[in-house]
Amino acid sequence: MRAIAALSLALIVLCGCSNSDKQAEFESRLAPPPLDPRLLARGQGTVKLNVAAGSSQQLDLSGLARQTGAAIDCATAVFLFTWLTQESEGLTFKGQRSDVAFDVGKGRSGLASLNACSRLDAVNESGKQVTGQVRYVVAEAQR
């Protein structure tokens, strides 16, 4: 019995599997969105997602752009993003601009873009809490 306990302890020490290590590994798997050569990046960042069952989390795109220091023109600004959830249920991303609602993307992971002055909601249609993250780039069409 002592041998089993010692082996278990040795595996825990060797693995070094703490929750912060698992979180860092998860976050490192999410690449930033690719940038079309016709676009000029103005800022980038990361947003953590924590969406309760049957609820949504709004992403303030113009606020995120301001946080990166990007001054955006709604006529030419684009919000490009990738997402990844820790749970298999995934999320549905819904956009809205000028009172017109539209689907942006759905699933455990993905890549999408929309006008940077749009509203974007991460919607959890499952019965479980979903966590994850979004990596984004705010860009403008080159003139």
Image: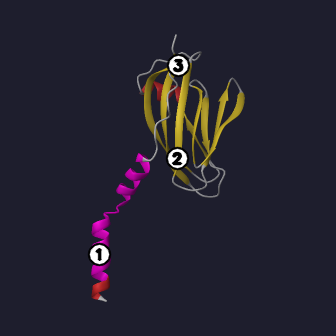
Q: Mark 1 points at which residue?
A: 9
Q: Position of residue 16 (x, y in %)?
A: 31, 63
- Residue depicted at 43% across the width and 51% down the height: 26
Q: Is the magenta stretch mostly helix, strand or loop?
A: helix
Q: Is residue 124 left or right of residue 14?
A: right
Q: Nearer the viewer, mark 3 or mark 1?
A: 3
Q: In which quarter of the image is the N terminus?
A: bottom left
Identify the disc placed on residue 38. Answer: 3
Q: Name the residue under label 2.
A: 84
Q: Distance between the residues labelled 3 and 2?
A: 26 Å
> Quick one: which residue is furthest to the front in this view?
37
Q: Where is residue 89 in the image (x, y as percent from the top left)?
A: 61, 55
Looking at the rendered structure, the kind of residue marked 2 is Leu
N-term-proximal mark, 3 vs 1 = 1
> What kind of element bears circle 2?
strand
Q: Which of marks 3 and 2 is in front?
A: 3
- Residue depicted at 71% across the width and 26% down the height: 99
> What kind of element bears circle 3?
loop
- Residue depicted at 61% across the width and 30% down the height: 119
Looking at the rendered structure, the kind of residue marked 3 is Arg
> Quick one: which residue is furthest to the right in this view?
100
Identify the disc placed on residue 117. Answer: none
Q: Give the range drawn in magenta.
A: 5-28
Q: Position of residue 107 (x, y in %)?
A: 62, 47
